Image: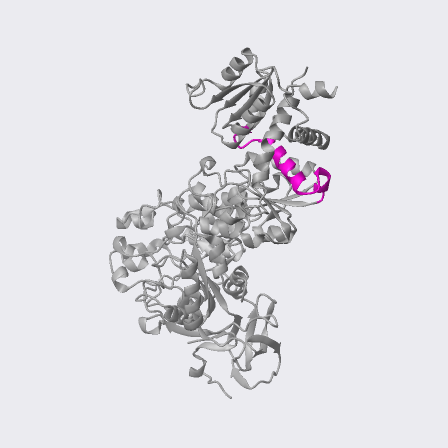
Amino acid sequence: MTRRNGQSPELVIRHARVLDPSTRLDAVKDVRLSGGRVAEVGDDLQGARKLDADGLHLFPGFVDVHAHWRTPGREDEETIESGSASAAAGGFTGVVMMPNTDPVVDKPVVVSGLLRRIEQESRVRAYVSAALHVGLKGERLTEMRLLKEAGALCVSDDGLGTQSAGVLRNAMLYAQSAGLPVLLHCEDHTLATGVVHDGAAAALAGVPGSPASAEDVATATALVLAAETGAKTHITHISTGLSAALVRFFADRAYVTSDTTPHHLTLTDELVSTLEGMYRVNPPLRPLDDRDAVTDALRDGTLDFVATDHAPHASEEKDLPLEQAAPGFLGHETAFAALHTELVLTGKLSLARLVEAMSYAPGRWVGEGGSMAIGSPADLTLVDPSEEWAVDRGSLSSRSWNSPYLGRRLTGRVVGTIVGGELVHDRTGARFGVRA
Amino acid sequence: MRNRDFLTLEETTREELREILDLARDVADGRLSKSLAGKTVCLAFFESSTRTAASFELAARRCGADVISLSESGSAIAKGESLVDTVVTLDSLGADAIVLRHPAAGAARLAARHTGAAVVNAGDGCGQHPTQALLDLYALSQAFDGFEDLAGRRAVIVGDVLHSRVARSVIPALRRAGMEVAFSAPRTLLPLETDAWDLPVLPSVDAALEWGAEVLYMLRLQNERMTGGSPRIPSVAEYGAYYGVARRHLHRGVRVMHPGPVNRGVEISGDVVLDGASLIPNQVAAGVAIRSAVLTLATGVAHEVAA
């Protein structure tokens, strides 16, 4: 499933409600794509191929800065092909792959090998995050300059988090010299000794909890070091109100960006009472107060964008008691629908801010995509805002099915994903058909 | 007679630099023999040294001084005697000059407060190493067309600036000579405040050459001085790729310097050490003349000779 950037034929998408936060456009328009780029936005545009999009929303393609495609090493859970199909089904046109694979992405040859396979196998644009430390162990720095030359976008010890402030500071300084942003999973392992949030639900269920401080202490450390070193720092999956407040405090003191996840914006630790392994995730689902504070922080721009932390797991790793299950949720395919259903339709977040937080803001971080300005890459997402659908195993493109939304009905669905002018995910035919 | 300490080059004027270099040339040309006859020079080395200790001793002896040599092993220093007590002892023995090497910055300044002898700083921790910078200027002046010819030329100091006393003396020396100076090092080997000296930071030796460097001053990775939880660089391969000088860099007449000891294959490849572009032998050779001149000035003899 290769993409042929720049060679795709002309396509006119007609009568879509075009919502592009990067240009502040929100109107029913036609959009002409040519040569893999956005060529024209206007009325009554003509082109060789037409796609009628009456009643559909057209957004800049979503960009997911945090995903685990399990390749290399756990191709039974996800491959570049299936991960990118899953991303495309969720409207994502760009994805950053985390380095906690087997082998770890800590050598230039692993980066260049992955990029070659992405070129051949990925439906969407995919970027490689290399490790910050060899083996993610927080000991020896990776060869960040050689990793950058090999094509790495950023560096991260995601999944573990760097435990020593001194080690992290050294790595942030080095990453800055190497010209690579640092993506940080903030978790203090001396505090994070449980498997769920240490709250009332954990107490009642009798499941060992990790306190919110496990995230907050590490977030504070990271922010202080970002401010001191000036390193370009991204803090991923913020899940507590205090961590969001810390990010707000450091907004003009450090070169820092941050994200939160669809599940931390829509679910709470009430799910702990099910005792099902499915609902284990790291950072853990938090109480309602945290969820609301994180939502507020996303709304007011304190948190820059949404990233899914798409984390496929085989059923034998999830179909277990909470304490024994692997942490992590699928994210790509339900991200927009869950946030649209839970936040936009309930009036907690505007559609424009959601689209910005899924396209323009992460696109700027990646350096590509997230805009429909003329001349931009033709990376677009078509959404039917009224389609109701049930999340079930059969509806998922991922090789795994550990979605916390399984069995739920969501409103709003991605029906078309365009990368470089080509439809890489297409359910439009079911309704309209592509007419020559 | 007056004694004159040589603790740092931070305050040294251009005129003073020229005076020392001129005197060193006189020494090299044999016009200043036995200038230290009747003087006592004490070498107190609280930290190991090869080049510096040898050339100070040779300089003192060639100039006719009596030399007392204390090293970290086989002396009261090894028995734990404090810096101040050692200095007071040497003072009582009638030392005219004390040449001091010590692992802590500021040791030479402290010593100078406790003796009437001239204190010559032979390297204090990550602080200063003034005679190294002076011999570097001497070697550079010879490589170009004299001291005046250095003005306006560009030099880049490459590598472990953070732990380098050499850099802290070479920077003011080169600037006083009118040279433009920049660094090239990863931030893990630079002070947090990279603008402490208000110098540009270049990303590699290649970038240094693009910037117009005519002199590459290579520093050794001082692993023994590095503190903290994790190594400052990921690998020798990556360090060498960006901050090592190789034969391919030696076009357009760039000169390569290094205060020694060299880590061959890390900051400098073996064939560069032996290349004609390398001023490393010239630096070592300049050591005796410079240190003779410094000891002569320190003990006030040159003042008398000139007067």
Q: Which residue is drawn at 50% across and 56% down?
A: A298
Give coordinates of residue A366: x percent, y percent: 52, 61
Relative to B77, say whether B105 is above or below.
below
| Viewer can see residue A231 | no
Q: Is residue B139 magenta?
A: yes
Q: Residue at x 64, y 53 (%)?
A: B252
Relative to A385, say whether B109 is above or below.
above
In the orientation shown, which residue stands out farthest toward the right? Answer: B307
Side of A60 where B146 appears, left or right = right
In the orientation shown, which residue stands out farthest toward the bottom? Answer: A436
Give coordinates of residue A276: x percent, y percent: 27, 58
- The image quadrant of residue B257 is top right
The one of A372 and A141 positioned closer to us in this rendering: A141
Point out the stretch of residues depicted in magenta. B123-152
Q: Is residue B175 magenta?
A: no
In the orientation shown, which residue stands out farthest toward the top? Answer: B92
Give coordinates of residue B149: x percent, y percent: 72, 42
Q: Which residue is drawn at 41% across and 42% down?
A: A164
Q: Which colour scheme is used?
A: one colour
